[in-house]
Amino acid sequence: MLDENKRHELKETANEIRKWALDMMQNLSQGTTGVHVGGSMSIIDILTVLYFDQMNIRPEDPKWPDRDRFILSKGHAGPGLYAVLARRGYFPKEMLYTLNRPKTNLPSHCDRIRTPGVDMTCGSLGQGISAAVGQALAAKMQNRKSTVYCMVGDGEMEEGQVWEAAMFAGAHQLDNLIVFVDSNGLQIGGTVQYVENYGDPGKLFGAFGFEVIDNVNGHDVDAIQEAIIKAKAIRKPVCIVCNTIKGKGFVTAEGERRCHSMAVSYEDYVASCAYIDETC
């Protein structure tokens, strides 16, 4: 359990990152260009706990061989990760305003070659978790203590490649792999239940040999930290299913499918900042 000071610090940091992410996206959008708001905003509390409390990392040395890794398999949520990396000190905040622009080092989907702190290039859904499994295996082969964290979307779980990776991780007992499911219930084509209705994500990962920590509030920093600490002590791969709200903090379309990709106006940004201060 977090002490009160640490809890307040993490919540304040997460809210600041939400504002940075929206500022970055509205700067790109100028009210007309769509950007992946929903999935970027739903993961920020989880990433804040990871990068500011749980991960063994060195922002001043992003390629440190013994670092923990984070792979955003749902790579379209890059803006959320970029805001976290900037706030953690991997690169200056001003770089956020280059999102998606010509010759940028912050493309819409994560690119490990371009962006300091990004551990794997992701875009095609399902590829990221496969890379995370490979990196977890490599760490074991090299006798490194690194933990590999991976974020998959609940819509992304419809990709068969996710389950090929899960099968391998379970078979090889990769206990240095922790997978988060961003379970916000929505994807670009509708609700996850409507599009595929594959059932309980935790039961699916459990069937492939993962220990499952289910029904974690993905916006409660205490619950997130507790789940991660528990996962680290388990001697098998772990899946943490986080219940989240798509577009968390984006008052214009919080919890709505349309925020998967939409423009963010300056008015949206201002209203959302006030909303975040009041409710998040």
Image (cartoon, grey):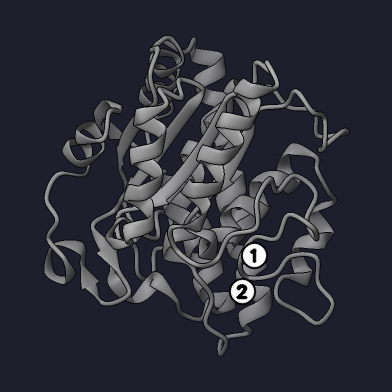
The correct choice, above or below, for 10 with respect to 124 in the image is: above
x, y percentage for residue 55? 62, 25
Quadrant for the N terminus in the image? top left
Q: Secondary structure at mark 2?
A: helix
x, y percentage for residue 138? 63, 31
x, y percentage for residue 73? 50, 53
- Per the model, the C-alpha gap separating discs 2 and 1 is 5 Å
* Along the line of sight, the residue nearer the viewer: 84 or 121: 121
Crowding at dot 2, Cα within 10 Å, few <14 / some 14-19 / many 20+, comes out as many
**Which amino acid type is marked by label 2?**
Gln
The correct choice, above or below, for 104 with respect to 10 in the image is: below
Quadrant for the C terminus in the image? top left
Q: Secondary structure at mark 1?
A: helix
x, y percentage for residue 255? 29, 61
* Side (left or right) of 115 relative to 110: right
Residue visible at 81% across and 38% down in the picture: 62
* Side (left or right) of 93 relative to 235: right
Crowding at dot 1, Cα within 10 Å, few <14 / some 14-19 / many 20+, comes out as many
* Side (left or right) of 77 relative to 52: left
The correct choice, above or below, for 192 with respect to 278 in the image is: below
Q: Verify CB contact (< 8 Å) between mark 2 and mark 1.
A: yes
- Return the mark for residue 37: none
Residue visible at 75% across and 48% down in the picture: 86
Residue 135 sits in which quadrant? Answer: top right
* Along the line of sight, the residue nearer the viewer: 181 or 169: 169
Residue visible at 59% across and 25% down in the picture: 9
Residue visible at 72% across and 43% down in the picture: 87
- Give the residue number, with chain letter if any, for mark 1: 23
**Which amino acid type is marked by label 1?**
Asp
Of all residues, the one furthest to the bottom in this rendering is: 32
Could you tell me how many numbered marks the image carries?
Answer: 2
- Return the mark for residue 26: 2
